[in-house]
Image (cartoon, rainbow, N blue to C red):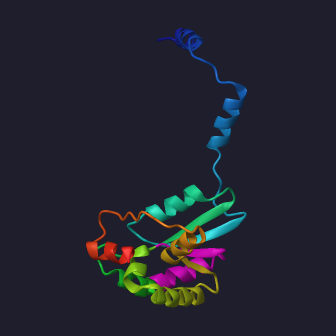
Amino acid sequence: MKRRQFITLAGVATLGSPTLPPHALAATQRARWRPDGAGSVARIGVLTPDFDPVPESEMWTMTPTGVSIHASRITWKWNDDPKAFAESTQVDTATEQLGSLKPQAIVYAFTSSSYALGAEADDAIRARLERRGGGVPVVLTCRAATEALRVLEARRIALIHPPWFKEEVSAKGRD
């Protein structure tokens, strides 16, 4: 096919196509722009196991413009004892690395260890990680969720665990 023939056919094909109004075109162009991830408003650090993409992706979905998420993944086998994750020196090292970014907070996104260790141990983990992170506040998911439910005065909640949770872990979560 020659160039002129191609251009003619392409032009004829577009005659039946609806055109985009100017505001739709502008919205399309804005959607192509992506922030650079620098966190001009705030930075949030996330500690998560290496096999779990969910906490980081959920946080990116919920963050407003200008807030950046900085994840540090910790090597851990999903079928190991959840207590081992919290006690791992990798968690301390990852917290130090995130602390050097000077985030506004670091989220400890590993609910299973909170289930296994309990609320008192969560307090000790938080205090240890805040020291390791240079004083950056550390938020643990179970403690934050529990407090949010109290503030909202929730009376009935549904607790849904992933299918890979062992029954004993799910039972501790219900407790």
Residue 117 painted magenta: no
Front residue of 159 and 112: 159
- Left or right, 1 with respect to 152, comes to left
In this rendered view, identify the residue nearer to me: 55 or 4. 55
Is 83 situated above or below 111? below
Residue at screen point 56% across, 59% down: 60
Question: Residue at 54% across / 70% down in the picture?
Answer: 149
**Residue 103 spot, x, y in % from top left:** 65, 74
Quadrant of the image occupied by residue 159: bottom left
Residue at image x 48%, y 75%?
A: 142
In the rendered image of this protein, does residue 56 appear above or below residue 2?
A: below
Chain part drawn in magenta = 91-109
Quarter of the image with the C terminus in it = bottom left
Residue 67: where, in percent of width, then height?
66, 62
Q: Is residue 104 magenta?
A: yes
Q: Where is residue 1 in the image (x, y as percent from the top left)?
A: 46, 11
Residue 69 sits above or below residue 32 on the image: below
- Give the left or right position of residue 84, taking residue 30 as reference: left
